[in-house]
Image: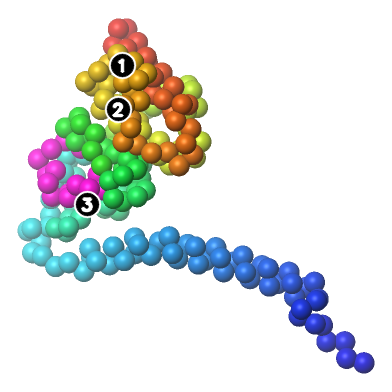
Amino acid sequence: MDHTPDPATDPSFLRISRRNFIKGVIAGGAAVSSAGYLFRASSLLGQRSAPGDRLLTLNVNGQLRRVDVSKQETLAWTLRYKLGLTGTKLGCDRAECGACTVLIDDVPHYSCSILTHTVRDRKVVTIEGLANSDGTLHPVQQGVIDEQGFQCAFCMSGFIMSAVGFLKTNPNPTRSEMAHALSGNLCRCQDYDKILTAMMRGAENMRKVRNA
């Protein structure tokens, strides 16, 4: 009698098939999500220009950083992949979500839409540059901790940088004014009320530090 297992009904075959299917989905998803960045990286690396045109000195977080930059390279790309400042997130990569927000001369900007060579004579601050040298967090960062303002926190650095820039011009905002200032930042978890509460706590913390 033939005891060869039937792939259509045998549980062991079904388990193996399910496992292989899940692995395939995970691998395929990872490949698709990274394909855009890999394609862009190869495009940037394939550009050719004289070394004298590529080497720039950037003022980032109060430090002068020498970096090799291609002509069409964005500031977000340089910060993350050349300077290792991965707190600046790449979300939409098309100036829509605000995850890549940094301060340039104290003004919030989407770093994914700014070419690196245009900021060579300006001051750039990322999320890594907010805390004091002794490790004390910036008041807005502390506000996020106080209120546990984010869920997945992918968008967090962009919101914080936007709030910090706004509070430099309006240190005592209303909740409505803060909401308007943060309207250029998107949260995939959509917990905007809690985020706004955290940013308002940050504003309060800043006033306390200023008046201490």
Mark 2 highlights which residue?
Answer: 181
The numbered mark, 1 or 3, whose residue comes first in the sequence reads 3
Residue at position x 8%, y 58% from top? 53
Disc 3 is placed on an element classified as: loop
Vertical placement of residue 12 versus 76, above or below:
below
Per the image, is 118 magenta?
yes
Vertical placement of residue 178 versus 102, above or below:
above
Q: Could one spot residue 83 in this view of the protein?
A: no
Mark 3 highlights which residue?
Answer: 74
Mark 1–mark 3 Cα distance, whole angstroms, equals 32 Å
Report x, y in % for residue 172: 30, 13
Quadrant for residue 107, please give it. top left
Report x, y in % for residue 54: 12, 57
Report x, y in % for residue 179: 35, 25
Disc 1 is placed on an element classified as: loop
Closer to us: 96 or 104: 96
**Looking at numbered disc 1 in the image, what kind of residue is underneath it?**
Pro
Left or right: 189, with 81 as reference point: right
**Looking at numbered disc 2 in the image, what kind of residue is underneath it?**
Ala
Per the image, is 142 magenta?
no
Left or right: 105, with 161 as reference point: left
Residue at position x 10%, y 61% from top? 51
Q: Which residues are magenta?
A: 111-124
Q: Are marks 1 and 3 in contact (CB under 8 Å)?
A: no
Outermost residue on the bottom side: it is: 1
